[in-house]
Image: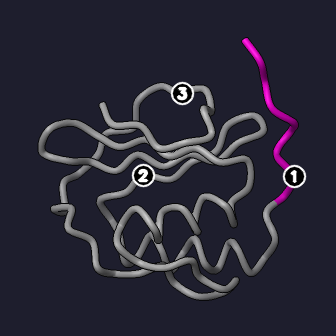
Amino acid sequence: MIAGPPRPAAEPEQLIRLARFRAAHPQVTVGSGTGYWQAVIAEDAGEIVVTRWTLAELLDRLGEVLGGERQAPGCAAGTGSAHPSVPVVPGPARQPTGHAERR
């Protein structure tokens, strides 16, 4: 198993951005592991898992996956999600792959 670098503390503006993203997208679970950030997006046929090394990169990618654009720091991600608001039960942490994967 290859572990990434230890996760540095997220920049304050990215934590504000994360709070805005969570408020706009309650169906997405966002968390961190040792050296990475990860999101799980619930879908009718399973889930999409997105993993990135930094919180800024993760939020940028989530904006793209959910139909928004890349966002400047401090801005909320796009709200044009086609995904239903389905509660997600967090599972065990998954190892980062650097790309989104459908399950």
Give the CA separation, mark 2 to mark 1: 20 Å
Q: Earlier in the sequence, mark 3 or mark 1?
A: 1
Q: Quadrant of residue 51?
A: top right
Q: Which mark is residue 22?
A: none
Q: Earlier in the sequence, mark 2 or mark 1?
A: 1
Q: Amino acid at mark 1?
A: Pro
Q: Which residues are magenta?
A: 1-9
Task: Say which residue label 3 marks.
Answer: 94
Q: Residue at x 40, y 46 (%)?
A: 40
Residue 19 pos. (x, y %): 54, 74
Of tags 3 and 2, which is closer to the observer? 3
Residue 65, compared with residue 19, is above or below; it is: above
Q: Is residue 61 left or right of residue 48?
A: right
Q: Residue at x 81, y 71 (%)?
A: 11
SS of the residue under disc 2: strand
Q: Quadrant of the N terminus?
A: top right
Residue 58 pos. (x, y %): 60, 58
Residue 80, compared with residue 32, is above or below; it is: below
Give the CA separation, mark 3 to mark 2: 13 Å
SS of the residue under disc 3: loop
Q: Quadrant of residue 35?
A: top right
Q: Residue at x 35, y 73 (%)?
A: 67
Q: Which mark is residue 8?
A: 1
Check if mark 2's residue and mark 1's residue have beta carbons within 8 Å.
no
Give the CA separation, mark 3 to mark 1: 19 Å
